[in-house]
Amino acid sequence: MKLDETHDPALRSWVESANAPDCAFPIQNLPFGIFRGKGRKELPRGGVAIGDQILDLAALGVRTGPTLNALAATGRPALRRLRRELSRALREKSAQRKRLARHLVSMRQAELLLPVAIGDYSDFYTGIHHATNIGRILRPDNPLLANYKWVPIGYHGRASSIIVSGTPIRRPLGQARLPDAPAPLYAPSMRLDYEAELGFITGTGNRLGRPIPIGEAFAHVFGAVLLNDWSARDIQAWEYQPLGPFLAKSFATTISPWIVTMDALEPYRCSAFARAADDPRPLPYLDNDDDQREGGFAIELEMHVRTARMKQPARLSRGNFRDSYWTVAQIIAHQTSNGCNLQPGDLLASGTISGTGADSLGSLMELTLAGKNRLSLPGGETRAFLEDGDEVIERGRCVREGFATIGFGEAAGRILPALAQ
């Protein structure tokens, strides 16, 4: 771990809301995002979350424009220096308090936008418990395919339909085939699902044809966001063979607006997933002692749902990214192993993160056994899959004794009815 003064749990900010015990954005966090005044005709710009406020980065001479891509491209050393500068400026008794206070914007008065322009998007499948659960549903005799423990499985997703938290989700239309039906039909998806994931934003890229060694992978990551990979399970079941997910995934992917930097995540590193004794050792390009020792991250992911009849959302699951079979460094090393070039702002998703308990399953597909067992909700409602009017809210946080608790905010979206055919 590379800890410094910015991780000190005793630090307090002159922004009082950042000192609240349940605050997602204390001074130890300092995530970056893009915002503008709500209802105002002003250009989007970069900011840092502190408590329930946003500090305009321009106050420190950092002018990002409408995306954080250029900031991400400056690299980890430069970002670490900016983090220290922000931490010192926002601490109690800072000499800059009076000047910087004029550059604070309340989150209630801000519109939060996509933080980066995403050029490319890959979705991995690192959650071994999710992969095994889905495999048992689809292939009871062979739940985990032979390549899973050898290679970080992933597919190239659609970057154009990645949206920021709060954007409504239109129920997709698509082809699906009912059991024993002679032909498919084209209709609104009836098996709409969510997936609890994390997304990692690329910082500095690599040249085409030059793989990133696993020991250098973290130098190429800007930070992490929450990610909900909405999935139309009926469309997916019909289309995915032989080439994998397509229209069942590309209609929407929701991410949270704040990028929690890799430096902020340093205290929450942990050992990589404990492989079974008979699991294969990763091939050399994916094998690194340091990565096995502390390449994992203890990040809690919660999924909540609020139906049109509910006043408060109900938590459906709580998982942890430490259950990821493959580490962040391994997916970056694999993504670039053939010479594929990453660019600042690219998005690499973890895949659904589930645990071993019934309360840690990161999708309705798992929670309801593909709709066979309806889920009971407060107030007497039940769900097999999502219905129109349902709002899904993903939340995340990092907790470790001896350090401040930091959060990610939310990745939320409400389901709208499909368009008329």
Image (cartoon, rainbow, N blue to C red):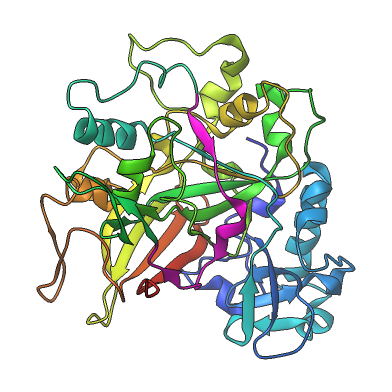
Q: Position of residue 38 (x, y in %)?
A: 65, 87
| Residue furthest to the right | 61
Q: Is residue 372 left or right of residue 24?
A: left
Question: Depth check: 310 or 177 in front?
Answer: 177
Q: Is residue 229 left or right of residue 46?
A: left
Q: Position of residue 140 (x, y in %)?
A: 17, 27
Residue ID at (11%, 49%): 372
Quadrant of the rendered structure where residue 141 is?
top left
| Residue furthest to the front | 182
User: Does 75 appear above or below 218?
Assistant: below
Q: Is residue 167 left or right of residue 116?
A: left
Quadrant of the rendered structure where residue 147 is?
top left
Q: Position of residue 77 (x, y in %)?
A: 81, 43
| Quarter of the figure that contains the C terminus | bottom left
| Residue 288 appears in the picture as rendered | no
Question: Depth check: 340 or 289 in front?
Answer: 340
| Residue 390 appears in the picture as rendered | yes
Question: Depth check: 190 or 405 in front?
Answer: 190
Residue ID at (36%, 15%): 146
Specify whether residue 163 is painted magenta: yes
| Quarter of the figure that contains the N terminus | top right
User: Does 323 appear above or below 250?
Assistant: above
- How many numbered markers are drawn? 0
Residue ID at (73%, 74%): 55
Q: Is residue 417 left or right of residue 23?
A: left
Residue ID at (50%, 55%): 226
Q: Position of residue 231 (x, y in %)?
A: 38, 52
Specify whether residue 160 is painted magenta: yes
Question: Depth check: 210 or 75 in front?
Answer: 210
**Magenta segment, which residues?**
152-172
